[in-house]
Image: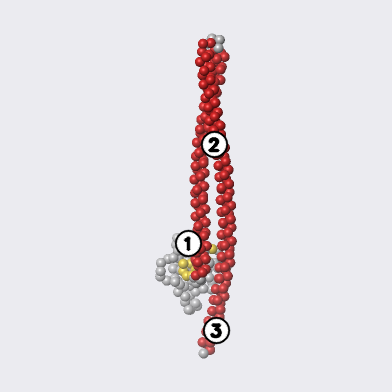
């Protein structure tokens, strides 16, 4: 806790006392409440002027506090909260909003992991099909080259080797049968490739839908966050107004006590 001195003329700096350092919570930029307070100077355990911050974490979102001005590695922690804890109903609302935000983030991470796994599996299947297709094309080309070579050799040696014509014809027939089988396999592979393309199109639609849902959820959270910031700003204004009223009452009481 901070020690507040009654005699500000002797020293404008006050030091925090005892206790273990507290981790400074996440903050939000507020141009109306930042930097060092020139009216009430507070110094942390390092002897440095403490800086003003507005919390943006958990049920303390929107509360103002004074914290050590050094970086996180050297910080001695929060010096003192300026605002009291929010009412219980507001704490419950803040807690629920943060839970909704965390659930949304968790759902997005799971969707991304699931999508990555699907893409990996589809890519593996596509690569395997591509390898099979390329091997079949190579085999077909080899068979076609072999057939062309056989025809050329037959034309050159037809007159001299009439006795080998029937076996060659049989080989050609067998090769044609193999080519027919290869054509059937090629058609089957083409169907699989078409199916894979359809899967890729469906995958693109899923990705677009996920992005659209994420953008809608992000816009919803942004709207809720703005409304919450407006609500917090109203509460801070009301708190400042009450503090001013209390100060006026205290001044009146001090004057009456002085008169008496």
Q: Closer to the N terminus: mark 2 or mark 1?
A: 1
Secondary structure under the numbered disc 3 in the rendered image: helix
The residue at the far bottom in this view is 260
Color scheme of the displayed model: secondary structure
Please provide percent x and percent y for residue 203: 55, 45
Q: State yes or no: discs 3 and 1 in contact (Cβ < 8 Å).
A: no
The answer to whether the residue labelled 2 contacts the one labelled 1, judged by CB atoms less than 8 Å apart, is: no
Question: Measured from the top left, where is residue 69 in percent x and y?
Answer: 49, 65
For the residue labelled by badge 2, is the local secondary structure a helix, a strand or a loop? Answer: helix
Instruction: Write down the residue under mark 3.
Output: 252
Residue 209 vs 251, above or below: the answer is above
Residue 52 visible? The answer is: no
Residue at mark 1: 71
- Residue denoted by label 2: 192
| Mark 3, other Cα within 10 Å: few <14 / some 14–19 / many ≥20 | few
* Front residue (pair 210, 7): 210
* Earlier sequence position, callout 3 versus callout 1: 1
Q: CA distance from mark 3 to mark 1?
A: 43 Å
**Where residue 227 sits in the image (x, y, percent)?**
58, 64
Q: Quadrant of the N terminus?
A: bottom left
């Amino acid at each position: 806790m901070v020690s507040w001195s009654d005699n500000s003329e002797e020293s404008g700096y006050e030091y925090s006392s005892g206790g273990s350092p507290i981790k400074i919570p996440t903050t939000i930029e507020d141009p109306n409440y930042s930097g060092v307070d020139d009216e009430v100077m507070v110094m942390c355990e390092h002897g440095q002027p403490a800086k003003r911050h507005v919390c943006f974490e958990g049920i303390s979102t929107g509360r103002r506090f004074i914290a050590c001005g050094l970086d996180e590695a050297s910080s001695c922690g929060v010096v003192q909260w300026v605002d009291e804890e929010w009412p219980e109903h507001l704490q419950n609302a803040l807690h629920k909003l943060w839970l909704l935000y965390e659930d949304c983030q968790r759902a997005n991470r799971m969707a991304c992991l699931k999508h990555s796994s699907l893409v990996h599996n589809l890519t593996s299947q596509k690569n395997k099909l591509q390898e099979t297709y390329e091997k079949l094309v190579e085999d077909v080309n080899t068979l076609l080259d072999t057939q062309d070579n056989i025809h050329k050799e037959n034309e050159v040696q037809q007159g001299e080797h009439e006795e080998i014509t029937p076996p060659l014809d049989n080989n050609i027939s067998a090769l044609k049968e193999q080519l027919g089988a290869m054509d059937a396999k090629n058609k089957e592979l083409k169907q699989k490739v078409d199916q894979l393309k359809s899967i890729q199109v469906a995958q693109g639609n899923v990705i677009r839908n996920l992005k659209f849902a994420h953008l809608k959820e992000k816009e919803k959270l942004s709207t809720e966050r703005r409304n919450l910031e407006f609500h917090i700003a109203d509460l801070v204004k009301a708190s400042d107004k009450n503090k001013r009223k209390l100060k006026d009452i205290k001044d009146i009481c001090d004057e009456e006590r002085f008169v008496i």
